Amino acid sequence: LLRLGNRRDLLVARRVPVLSRGLLCDKYNVTSVDVVQLDCEGKDAAIVRGLVKYCEDHPAAWPRVIQFEANQLTPVLEVQAAVSLLHKNGYWVRYWSSCNILLER
């Protein structure tokens, strides 16, 4: 049950489509983007891994800036591994707080 002011609304479960970066880019004919910003409730580092894999196969697809959430929802070692992976691919940390990391290439 979700309370909105004096209203009470039921939360409704719905299936939504999930697309990988590759499928999303293919579906909408996107070859590159400048900025990728993620806020995926603890799954950001996993998505970063998928992004890197895609970009390794499609070098023109590397974004200039990547920002992702790195808070208590993601294990510290997983966040550090994602940053290390990006660093190995030419990114440097521009900003790192207790909640977000911004890297630039």
Image: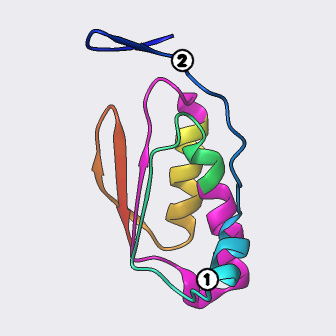
User: What residue range appears in magenta?
Assistant: 48-77
Q: Is residue 105 left or right of residue 32?
A: left
Q: CA distance from mark 1 to mark 2?
A: 34 Å
Q: Nearer the viewer, residue 90 or 27?
A: 27
Q: Secondary structure at mark 2?
A: loop
Say which residue appears at 56% left-offset and 71% top-offset.
Answer: 89
- Nearest to N terminus: mark 1 or mark 2: 2
Q: Are marks 1 and 2 in contact (CB under 8 Å)?
A: no
Identify residue type, mark 1. Answer: Tyr
Instruction: Identify the residue shown where x is 44% and y is 37%.
Output: 70
Q: In the image, what residue occupies the spot 55% across and 22% down?
A: 11
Residue that badge 1 annotates = 28
Image: 54 above or below 5: below
- Which residue bears the numbered disc 2? 10
- Asked if the magenta segment contains residue 101, the reply would be no
Seen in the picture, residue 42 relative to 92 is either above or below; the reply is above
| 49 is within the stretch colored magenta | yes
